[in-house]
Every structure is written in structure tokens, then in C-alpha cells.
Image (cartoon, helix red, strand yellow):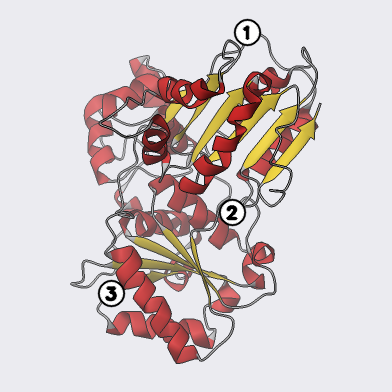
Amino acid sequence: MNYGENIPNESLIRARHEKGWSQAQLAEEVGTTFETVSRWERGVVMPGSYYFEKLCSSLGKTARELGYGKADSVLLPSGDSSQRIFISSAFADSEHGFVVALKKELAMRDITLWSSRMVKRQSLHRKSIVLQEAIRAAQLVLVILSPHTKRSTHVGYTRELARHFKRPVCEVWIEGEYLHECMPENYGEPGLVIDARGGEEHTLRNHILTMIECKLLTSGDLETVELSEPSWNVPEQSKVLVGREDLQERVGTLLRGPHIRLLTITGAGGMGKTHLAIEVARKVREYFVDGICFVSLTTIRDPALVVPTIAKEHGIKMVGDSSMLERVTVVLKRKRFLLLLDNFEHVLEASVQLPELLAACPLLKILVTSRSKIRGLAERSDESQYMLL
């Protein structure tokens, strides 16, 4: 999802090959993840100034030799404020009266504001670069939602970059009957949604400003962080999964979508549930920016051991008097993470803990394989779904 087709950085790829390094080796040299290196090489995102220096030092090349010239540098307009917001909207919404008034209110409160209009003024080859740097530098991404955003490539790409750089997102819903009809395809879970479709406009703007200043820009819980090493604890498969491409795509689409948080693949033994789930995990790997963890329950028969097994596979240790469930929720609370629970039919009674875990971890999703349905979750049709092999 971009303003144009991503152009691979052949210079960076060639420099890595000259060293005889894999993407993982280059990632280790510069202190990032191989997924990030892959994005750099595919032209999806550009490295920031810190990683520019690390790449040049590790590969023994200048920025221009690595395919990054001075023309690629970005100078964002800024003020004296330490608070920085990027407002993303469809072009049709950028001149909406409520949006224009909201921008003026933010500017009056000494907040540095960047918007989609700033990106639109750039030449075609610089649009993605400027947007990347703006999202990287922003403390908060404010997305304007309306039926116009459903088809907005810009808004979708903004959300993708916010996930990549781990920037908190707040959606302001200004028009439309249903929220999901205002979100671009693969938008993912919304952040803090503020419904601004009705009521007195001045009161609504004040409410939004209060939420932004008090709940987001000054909140320690939503403090922005650098891109961290995602966890990838999924077994390698010796055989390639042949067929079931449509099913893989359906499961992947559900996991990336905004509605389903608990998905169970059911079927008789030997039908390939585990293999399918692992292949799907590979396909959605970039969406779950904080990682994916495979938890085998094949040898577990005591439901009380499910959460400790999850903690063990994720490297979570007991601290103080807190329960293991509390420790798991603390670690996963703010992470866009996928848990893959395999062979759950042995510990069905532990299913009562899954809703609790999901409620405490709003960005968490769970993919379960089981020979039988998980009782007690049928009424959670808003978040749960079964898929039969």
C-alpha cells in the first residue's frame, strides 16, 4: 500500500551481497530486525538518520552509494512545541469544516501539526518519503474517518506506517453510519475512536482536544517507543503446504481485519490444522509487529498449565506475588501480538481464560487449532469465529 509501486533499493541489496551477508546478518550489524532490513530493501520505508549512519558504517559505503542521496533528506516544518501530531485524512475531508476548525484549535494550543495536505504538495517520488518521516517524528497520528477514507490509499498507508513505527493512533469519526464502512481494507484494529458525528461542534472539538492532550500526548501508557525486536517463536516446517491457498487467504484476512480477535480452526486429527496455522502465521508476520508465538499444548492435560506454558514459550518469568496470567497480560498489554495455541482440545476448560486475556490486551489476537469447538465462546460472535476443515 503506497503512493506508487515500491522501488527496490538495488544499491543497498548489492552492498549487502558484497559483504556476503543475509538480511538477518545485516540486521544484527545495525541493531534492528531482518523484517526492517527487508522493508528498506523493498523500498517500503526508509531508514532514519540513526540507521543511515549504522548502514554506512557497517557496509563501508556513503549514503549516496547505498541509494540514498541528499534529495532523499526531509526537512519537516516545525515549531518550538515538543508536541507533534500528524493528521491523516482523505482529500475530500481535508477541507471539511469540522476538520479545518480542529486544525486551527490544535495550532492555537502550540502543537506542531503536520497533515495530509503537506504530503500532497510534494512531488510524486517524495510523497512516501515525507509521510514516513512525519509519522516517524509524530507523537500521535490522528486519522479522520468518513466514507471517503474507505478508498483512501493515503489513509491506509498512514495506518501501516503508524504500526511500523509504533505510533499511537486516534480516530475522529466525522461521517458515516457504520465505522467499518469508513476504514480502508486491512486497516486493522482502530485505536481510540472519538465519535464526532453529532452534537455541538465547539463542544466536540473541546472534547477531542482534551482527550488528545490529557489522555494521549501526556500519557505514560502511550509513550512512543522505538521499533523493538519482534518476537518470532514459530517452528519451521519441513514440508511445503500444497493447496488450501484460498483458506490461507481467508484466515489471514480475518486476522488482519478489525473484527475477529479469536479464531479457531477445527477439524479431525491429521487434517493439517497445525500446518495451516503456521503457514498463515508466516503470511501475517509483518502485520503483528510485536511478534507471533506458537504454543504447543499436545502434551498438556491440566488446564491450569495453559497460561504457564504460554509464559514459558514467550520467556515470561514470575515476578513477586502476581499470578502468571497477570504477568502475561502485563507483557502483552500494549503489543500487537498473535498467540497460536495448538491442539487446544486437550485443555478445553482453560478456554475461560481466553476472553480475560483478550480483554486485558486490546491489540492481542489468538489463533487456536482444536479437534472440537471451544465451549462458552459461541455468544462472542462479535470477536470469535470458527473455521472447519
Indicate the amino acid at tag 2: Tyr
Residue 373 location (% of width, % of height): 75, 31
141 or 6: nearer the eye? 141
Q: Earlier in the sequence, mark 2 or mark 1?
A: 2
Q: Earlier in the sequence, mark 1 or mark 3?
A: 3
Cα distance in 3D space between marks 1 and 3? 53 Å
- At a point 51% along the width and 24% down the height, the residue shown is 304
- At a point 58% along the width and 28% down the height, the residue shown is 340
Indicate the amino acid at tag 3: Ile
Residue under circle 1?
A: 238
Cα distance in 3D space between marks 3 and 2? 26 Å
Cα distance in 3D space between marks 2 and 1? 33 Å
- Does dot 3 land on a helix, a strand or a loop? loop
Q: Is residue 181 left or right of residue 336?
A: right
Residue under circle 2?
A: 187
Q: Quadrant of the C terminus?
A: top right
